[in-house]
Structures are given as C-alpha cells and as structure tokens.
Amino acid sequence: MEKSTRMLTPKRRFPEFRSSGKWKSDLIADVATISKGKGISKADVTKDGATPCIRYAELYTLYGEVINEVRSHTNISPEDLVLSRAEDVILPASGETRADIATAACVMRDGVALGGDLNILRSDLHGPFFSYLLNSPLRYMIAQVAQGDTVVHLYPSQISTISIAYPSLAEQQKIAECLSSLDEVITAEGRKLEALKDHKRGLMQRLFPQPGETQPRLRFPEFRGKGEWQKRKITSLLTKSASPVRVKANEAYREIGIRSHGNGIFHKEPVRGKALGEKRVFWVEDNAFVLNIVFAWEQAVAVTSVAERGMIASHRFPMYKAKLGKSDVGFIKYFFLTNKGKELLGIASPGGAGRNKTLGQKAFENLEFLSPVQFEEQVKIARCLSSIDELIYAKFQKISTLIAHKRGLMQQLFPAPEEQ
C-alpha cells in the first residue's frame, strides 16, 4: 500500500477545529514503532499476582478501546515480560476471524505485561485517539491485510503498510474525550443491566423451592400460609398442540427458532413453501410453551406471543398449551430456567453433547416438578419475573442504541478508509 500524499477531512468536526485545515495522511510505519508482546499463558494468571497483565483473548471479552483498569495479574518475573508504556496501543496478532483481529485497545498505564499474541504500537499520537481510529471504519482495512483462514494472523509488516489520517494533537484529544464520555455512559448502562440480571437470578432462587424444600423462601403476601407446593407431571399441566401446515409451494412462510439459556424466540427469513421440501411444519400458536428439542438441555425454552402468530415451526419445536386453571405457561418457562429445571431437561435429553443430546418428548411429558396448588400463584410469579425481563430488555435496547450511535459517530469523526 503506497503512502498517500493527500490531506483528509472527516464529515464532522468540532467547531473550534473547522478552520484548522485538513488531516495529515501517513503510513502507520511513519508514525509508530511496532513490536510484539511476550507469552503469558492462562495458567500464569493469578489473582494475587504482582504485575498487571493483558492476554490477547481478553481484548474480546474484558476491554473496550481504552484500558484504564487491568483485570488480570501474573507473578512472572518482570525481566521475562514485555511491559507497556502509557498510551501504547495493542492489536491481536492472531484470532479466529478477520473481524476479531481488527480490535485495538489503548493501555493507559506503564508497566502492564503484554501477552505474546499482541502487536504493540507505540507512537506520538494521542493513544486513545489512535485506538479509536483503528477501531473506526479503518478496521476493515486492517482485516483485509490479515492472513489465514482457520486462524487469522496479523503481522507488524502488514500493519506498517496501512495508511492512516490524523489531525493536530488537540483535535485528537477532543475526539477521544467525546468517544470516551460515550463509552462511560455505555459502561454505566451495562452495569445497570448486569445488576438487573443479578437481581432476577437472586429472585428466582427465592421464588422457587430450593433442593430438599417443598415451598419457596419468598411468597407473595396473599399466598403465605397456603401450604407446600405439590409435585405434578407435565401432562397434568400442559396439553401438546400440533396443527400441521399444508404447505403450498408458492406461499411464503416464516419459521421460528429458539435461543438457548432462555434468550427467547427469533424469526427466520421468509421462504417459499417449495424451499421447505419434505420438512414437517406446524402453525405457531400464541401463548404456548415451546422447546427446541435439540438444545432443550441448554434451556432453549420460550413462550410464544402474538408476534409469532401466522408463523410456522418444524417438528423440532413442540408446543404445549396450558390446561385451563391448572397452569400458566410463563410460570413453567421460568421453572425450566432454574437449576432444577435445567437438571430435568437434561434427564429428558439422553445422549452425548450437542446435537446428539435430543429431548425425548415422552420423557419430557413425564417429568414431575413442584408447583403451587393455587393457579393464581403461578400467574403472580410469572408476571413478577416477566416485568423484570421487560426492564432487562429495555436496558439492552438502550445499550444497543448507544452502541449504534457510537458506531455512527465514529463514521463521521474519522475519514472513511476508501478516502485514505
């Protein structure tokens, strides 16, 4: 890639820099030295380690574009480590996908040990700005120069040929401050989301009986003193519902899928009937308890809603309707999201791991578990947990909106790669 001699301007600039001239363009090799970290295995990481450290895999799970607090530590002698200088920017040297490998972060502290599968970029650019720049649409250029299929590699020689554009140091700092403040909001909302999830987990432990107990530790006032819960079979609570679809070749149909760990129903893209071939499919009924028999052991359970009305499901997604006055499908869904519920789904899903561990529908229908004698108590528990799920979903949507806003802002604050 040849060095560009053009000067560049992003689509959006802060008022005080609009008359500051265009950005400068250089190869990364002209503005940064690139070196490699030194091996730190997972076994080398310890809670009471003397030296903070960062391993390449942590870039995908623990950190964003700017690293202020380091989570891991090691007791390897500093003499055998590669230590950071404040505002070093790190990039993975290998990864599973090209998108993974184009993940940069700026280390804001001196003396952090940097693992062996990390490229270290040291420059006079403002570190956080450099990190955001590499994570901007420029990341697609980085992904293009990476090599490999099963495992993707990114070498210093490849990084050095990438052309970047950058403004004055003052403008770099302003851009980084703007994006960092947005990241702080996203992080704060993320903490609130995790707090809601923790609250829900704790509440579920109290709203359902614990092992060896026959009633929950927390009951709503109107059901206190109403006695123990009773063990009942699925067949006494639910009735299987199956309305076969007479598929027409030229009609459009939309199938549902179910995510594991109680993460809900998703809708597949519409297909013509002829694309379904010989697959047995059934009409989805709303307010039905539904499982994915292939991943039931992973708690792939849900309750359908009016949003799925008119859609179809294959035979791998059996549906059950509540027996009137006997059960609430929401309560049953939440039960199967407890540890005991997961255990029972595993019992009804014999076989090895993955796709060999398929739910036996007869075995499922014969499962027994504790439920309230009063139908109204089931409803109350389901509504309580559902209201928390609504808060969780709203918080998740807010975070998604903030992330999308940040992505759009970065597209405007940095020149597009094709312009460089």
Image: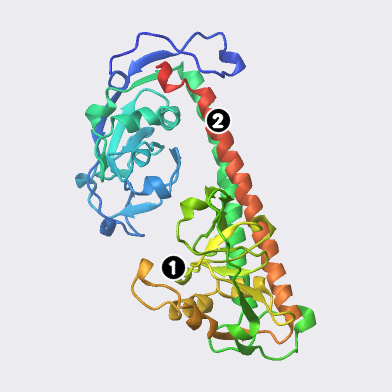
Residue pointed to by mark 2:
408
Question: Is residue 404 positioned above or below 384 on the image?
Answer: above
Q: Quadrant of the C terminus?
A: top left
x and y percent of residue 18 in the render?
A: 57, 12
Q: Nearer the viewer, residue 292 or 17?
A: 292
Name which quarter of the figure residue 98 lies in.
top left
Q: Is residue 75 left or right of residue 321?
A: left
Residue beneath the point at 37% across and 49% down? 58
Q: Nearer the viewer, residue 152 or 238?
A: 238
Q: Nearer the viewer, residue 352 or 44?
A: 352
Residue type marked 1: Val
Q: Is residue 364 left or right of residue 324?
A: left
Q: Nearer the viewer, mark 2 or mark 1?
A: 1
Question: Is residue 287 positioned above or below 62 on the image?
Answer: below
Which label sits on residue 386?
Answer: none
Residue type marked 2: Gly
Q: Is residue 390 left or right of residue 74?
A: right
Q: Residues within 10 Å of mark 2 (few under 14, many from 20)?
A: few
Residue pointed to by mark 1:
294
Q: Quadrant of the N terminus?
A: top left
Question: Is residue 58 positioned above or below 130 on the image?
Answer: below
Residue beneath the point at 41% across and 13% down? 24
Q: Earlier in the sequence, mark 2 or mark 1?
A: 1
x and y percent of residue 234 in the render?
A: 59, 83
Question: Is residue 322 positioned above or below 144 on the image?
Answer: below
Dot 1 falls on a residue whose secondary structure is: loop
